[in-house]
Amino acid sequence: MMLILDSYFKNFPARRKVAEFLFETGLSVKNGKIYLREVEVPISELSRVIGVNRKIIYHTIEYIEKTYPLKMIFEKLNPLPSLVTMAPIMGWEVLEIELEKTDYSFALSELLRYLHESNVPIMEIFSRNLRQEDAKAYIIIDGILPVDVFVKIKDIPGFKKLVLHTPEKSKERVVCSYCEVKYCPKKVAVEGLNVKN
């Protein structure tokens, strides 16, 4: 995607900044306006957040809508919700992985095989391997990743960096330590295990 932005916005650095922000946040461009799914986003607020004047945003919208390949891409953008940032307060671990681009597919498939063989419960996988960005994956784990699995993962060819984000230690700040929420996936799972035993 960054190559497309480089190609179409090489002579317009301020517009490129706007287009990059729209892409990264999943904001779409339709009918001369910017949307977060079906909600129109105020141009004045966008200009404040991005750090450009409103005129630049209007020019960017106009340029995107006049340029067919850009129009096709930007009218279909949507934000992708992820559990990565909220996982620690739910008591889940997040395995953040940076991979070599050339070994991305192999390393990721080996990692998933190890997790499956070790019965590690996965809540979510979020991953990207774009040309001009680091190849990264985030795996949210319900519970604690066993040490032996972590050691195996480190030895897979293609891994550049592993970071394990652990759950919030303060029980007052954890949302789901047998919380009072009526429906909580973790509470339901634990109660289900107790019923089976």
Image (spheres, helix red, strand yellow):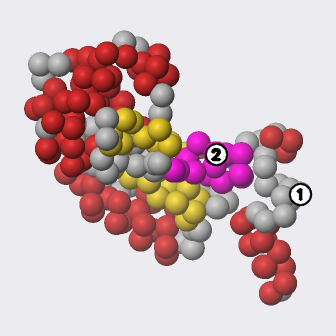
Rendered image quadrant of residue 57: top left
First to last magenta residue range: 81-95
Q: Secondary structure at mark 2?
A: loop
Amino acid type of disc 2?
Met
**Mark identifier at residue 161:** none
Give the camera-side residue of 181 and 172.
181
State left or right for residue 99 relative to residue 86. Answer: left
| Residue placed furthest toward the front | 31
Comes first in the chain, label 1 or label 2: 2
Amino acid type of disc 1?
Glu
For image coordinates 56% across by 56% down, the residue present is: 140
Judging by the rendered image, the residue that carries numbered circle 1 is: 180
Let me know if residue 158 appears in the view: no
For image coordinates 31% across by 51% down, the residue present is: 76
**Quadrant in which the N terminus is drawn:** top left
Judging by the rendered image, the residue that carries numbered circle 2 is: 86
For image coordinates 74% across by 72% down, the residue present is: 189
* Residue 94 on the magenta segment: yes
Q: Residue 87, image x and y in percent? A: 63, 49
